[in-house]
Amino acid sequence: MLLVISLLFCLLHHSHGSAYNVMNYGAKGDGKTDDTKAFQEAWQQLCNDVGPKSRLTIPLTKTFLVGPINFQGPCKSPSIHLRILGTIVAPDNPSSWNNCETGAWLFFANVNGLIIDGDGTIDGRGNAWWTKSLTDIAKEFKCAIPPSALHFENCNGLRLRHLKHRDSPRNHISLSRCSYSTISNLDIAAPANSPNTDGIDVSLSTQIQILDSVIKTGDDCIALINGSSQINITGINCGPGHGISIGSLGINGEYATAEGIYVRNCNFSGTQNGARIKTWQGGSGYARDITFEQITLHNVNNPILIDQYYCPGGNNCPKETSAVKISGINYRFFQGTSSSRTAINFDCSNKVACSGISLDQINITSTVIGESTIARCNNAYGASSSTEPSATCLIR
Ligand SMILES: *[C@@H]1O[C@H](CO)[C@@H](O)[C@H](O)[C@H]1NC(C)=O
Ligand SMILES: *[C@@H]1O[C@H](CO)[C@@H](O)[C@H](O)[C@H]1NC(C)=O
Ligand SMILES: *[C@@H]1O[C@H](CO)[C@@H](O)[C@H](O)[C@H]1NC(C)=O
Ligand SMILES: *[C@@H]1O[C@H](CO)[C@@H](O)[C@H](O)[C@H]1NC(C)=O
């Protein structure tokens, strides 16, 4: 009888995959004890489980202090579920991180079909990093740059949703070499003055959706960097922050690409930029087939911006003669206010013109009552209709 029951249990167990709980691996969840080992061991079990639906729970009402973790795949199950109900926090003193190998605090590599959800919080405690110079970070923390909070490397079918992300040392979430993935219903926040705290960065990835999220940070809400293609972004509330950016592309003369990007139904509030494309002088490659539509702006400094002279931290960038080619850029249904006079600014490369810029149904007024907004163009080809401020500076 016992044999039959345990056999049955085994069968059930096997066919549904197992449910793991990090508490069963020695985690304390008191916010003080280092639970890194427990997370690593629980992950090993989860990743080795044949599934098909294996799950690891990080329980509610507890706070887990963990250092850098390398969540390595490939895993045996085609679907791995990490359910974060409680809070995960990074060490408050970065000198105890002791590992900058992966460039991220929570690093996931080569895991297919990964689902991370659960209404929990991931707190990177970035403050200790933000206040240090890169020299001090190298000396004291043995890191070249502050780490990302959450990085996904080489993922397929990632579902990241319903989580709170707080105070990353650098960008909150980054994806590289990922495909067919969806990020949704996130709440990402860091102080408006925290450096380089992008919300979500995407590079070398295709077929990605970013949906229905609130992002308030000190840098780009979303940045689509080199090798981003077929990316849909909808339902994002951005601000404070630096807007949704394509780029920067082409640093140090690099070849870089971005294409097939569709940003729809997004709000920008008090941001430095709205829809921005930024490239460095001297690069090559292209940014093309990009659409921004149904955009609401409240008090945005550069609502529509193409900046091919991107040079953060001043004008020390040497003059170059090549550039990332920008073409096929559509802006439709923009409504709202600009905090600067130049609501539309196409500052294209003097050597490589922007082409195929299209503006339609745009109405951006000034935050200052009685002041009008303007459009500026440099070497920008395209056409506009129903656009306020009028963009007659575009070359037809
Ligand atoms: C993006 O949206 C378009 C239009 O709705 C759709 O055809 C396309 O499949 C979407 N791409 C992704 C990656 O979700
Ligand atoms: C940009 O991505 C392309 C592939 O799309 C790659 O060939 C190139 O090396 C990348 N550039 C950089 C600087 O990473
Ligand atoms: C943008 O803000 C308006 C109100 O200002 C709201 O109705 C709309 O749902 C918001 N859109 C998104 C994507 O959150
Ligand atoms: C543009 O927006 C302003 C402020 O919302 C509004 O008063 C004005 O009528 C709009 N213009 C057009 C052409 O829709």
Image: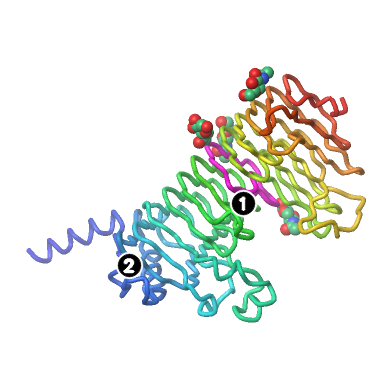
Q: Nearer the viewer, residue 329 or 19?
A: 329
Q: Residue furthest front?
A: 370
Above or below, 176 relative to 336? below
Give the quadrant of the C terminus. top right
**Residue 202 — which label?**
1
Give the magenta range.
221-243
Count the marks: how many? 2
The answer to whether the beta carbon of the residue marked 2 is less than 8 Å from any atom of ligand 1 is: no
How far apart marks 1 and 2 lie (CA) works out to: 30 Å
Q: Is residue 142 left or right of residue 390?
A: left
Give the quadrant of the N terminus. bottom left
**Residue 301 — which label?**
none
Whether tag 1 and tag 2 are in contact, CB under 8 A, the answer is no
Taking the spot 52% from the left edge, 52% from the top edge, the residue there is: 156
Q: Which residue is mark 2?
A: 22
Q: Secondary structure at mark 1?
A: strand
- Residue 367, x across and y down, in percent: 66, 33
- Residue 154, x across and y down, in percent: 57, 58
